[in-house]
């Protein structure tokens, strides 16, 4: 099966954030107090986004204590934030050589591999994280994401199910499950997963957005439900006080797919009015379609044009 690449790196970045936080907060071993002060200063620079200064200080520490795994992971984290992925991978690899049970190093290196689009390299590192932290639900989620991006949806879903058994109320995990089902065109299962997300967290923007789009654009007529799709798109707008253009545009999409073009034009225009310049061409293109009574998403049997549902 071809690789899907349906899931963003957002779930993986969770591991990076957690891993780097652990590495930066780890107490240093028996090293001179002066170097402990340097590590503390380096962390302050990292937290403030002064990455070159942080790297310079980690260099100083590692010149005196070259086998300090926590400093290697922390320096690698700085390099990764600068998009210097290969040097970061070298730091993480050296840290793992020094400390084979350093889950922070595995998590950070897996994220670096994911950023250079090598999920095949990231997967063994996620295996190691789960070996070290078998009850961490998020570790199963990110491994599932990686498997999905390697074109292994059933293996991915198995990991997601484990994650949900450990943390059944996590709306983001339900969304990930829905995205995997949707990628393999199991739309009814995707709908159930997205519905589970918004039941778990009524304020889940991801859940409402994914569910709205599926309900109004799905090629499977048994899954489509224009009225409910509009309701979930409206919920996204309410949750963001009608201030985020992406959700305004989603509401326009929902109305257009339902054949309610006056409402579609209204909300698409609102999106145009609040969107940045780089988003304008695509938004204007859709607005022009709606004015012509046309939808952006083509499905086999669109609804008749109507003014309400």
Image (tube, grey):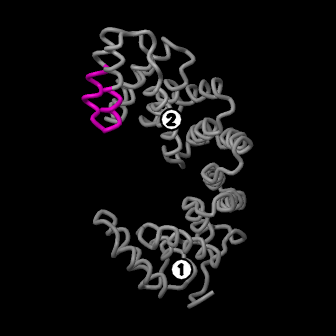
| C-alpha span from label 2 to label 1 | 40 Å
Residue 52 counted in the magenta span: yes
Residue 233 counted in the magenta span: no
Above or below, 284 against 26 in this view is below
- Residue at coordinates 54% horizontally, 49% vertically from top-left? 6
Furthest-bottom residue in this view = 307
Please tell me whether mark 2 sits on a helix, a strand or a loop.
Answer: helix
The mark closer to the camera, 2 or 1, is: 2
- Residue at coordinates 62% horizontally, 27% vertically from top-left? 127
Report x, y in % for residue 94. Answer: 43, 15
Report x, y in % for residue 32. Answer: 36, 10
* Residue assigned mark 1: 255
- Residue at coordinates 49% horizontally, 31% vertically from top-left? 19
Q: Which secondary structure class fits the magenta region best?
A: helix
Q: Which residues are magenta?
A: 41-58
Report x, y in % for residue 225. Answer: 66, 74
Q: Place residue 214 in its image quadrant.
A: bottom right
Q: Are marks 2 and 1 in contact (CB under 8 Å)?
A: no
Please tell me whether mark 1 sits on a helix, a strand or a loop.
Answer: helix
| 219, 64: nearer the viewer | 64
| 25, 6: nearer the viewer | 25
Report x, y in % for residue 235. Answer: 56, 71
| 238, 270: nearer the viewer | 238
Which badge, 2 or 1, comes first in the chain's sequence? Answer: 2
Label 1 packing within 10 angstroms: few (<14), some (14-19), many (20+): many
Q: Place residue 68 in its image quadrant.
A: top left
* Residue assigned mark 2: 18
| 204, 128: nearer the viewer | 204
Q: Quadrant of the C terminus?
A: bottom right
Q: Quadrant of the N terminus?
A: top right
């Amino acid at each position: 099966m071809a690789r899907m690449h349906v899931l963003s790196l957002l779930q993986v970045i969770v591991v990076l954030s957690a891993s780097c936080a652990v590495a930066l907060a780890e107490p240093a071993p028996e090293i001179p107090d002066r170097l402990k002060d340097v590590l503390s200063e380096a962390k302050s620079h990292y937290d403030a986004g002064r990455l070159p200064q942080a790297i310079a200080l980690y260099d100083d520490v590692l010149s005196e204590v070259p086998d300090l795994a926590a400093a290697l992971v922390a320096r690698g984290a700085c390099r990764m934030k600068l998009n210097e992925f290969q040097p970061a991978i070298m730091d993480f690899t050296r840290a793992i050589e020094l400390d084979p049970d350093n889950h922070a190093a595995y998590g950070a290196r897996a994220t670096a591999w994911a950023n250079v689009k090598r999920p095949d390299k990231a997967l063994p590192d996620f295996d190691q994280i789960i070996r070290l932290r078998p009850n961490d639900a998020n570790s199963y989620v990110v491994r599932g994401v990686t498997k999905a991006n390697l074109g292994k949806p059933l293996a991915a879903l198995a990991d997601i199910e484990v994650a949900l058994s450990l943390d059944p109320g996590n709306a983001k995990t339900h969304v990930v499950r829905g995205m995997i089902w949707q990628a393999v065109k199991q739309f009814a299962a995707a709908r159930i997963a997205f519905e589970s997300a918004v039941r778990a967290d009524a304020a889940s923007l991801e859940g409402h957005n994914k569910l709205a789009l599926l309900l109004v654009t799905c090629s499977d007529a048994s899954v489509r439900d224009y009225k409910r799709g509009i309701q979930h798109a409206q919920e996204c707008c309410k949750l963001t006080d009608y201030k985020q253009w992406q959700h305004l545009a989603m509401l326009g999409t929902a109305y257009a797919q339902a054949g309610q073009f006056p409402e579609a034009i209204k909300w698409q225009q609102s999106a145009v009015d609040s969107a940045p310049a780089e988003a304008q061409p695509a938004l204007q293109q859709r607005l022009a379609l709606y004015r012509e009574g046309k939808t952006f998403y083509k499905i086999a049997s669109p609804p008749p044009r109507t003014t309400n549902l």
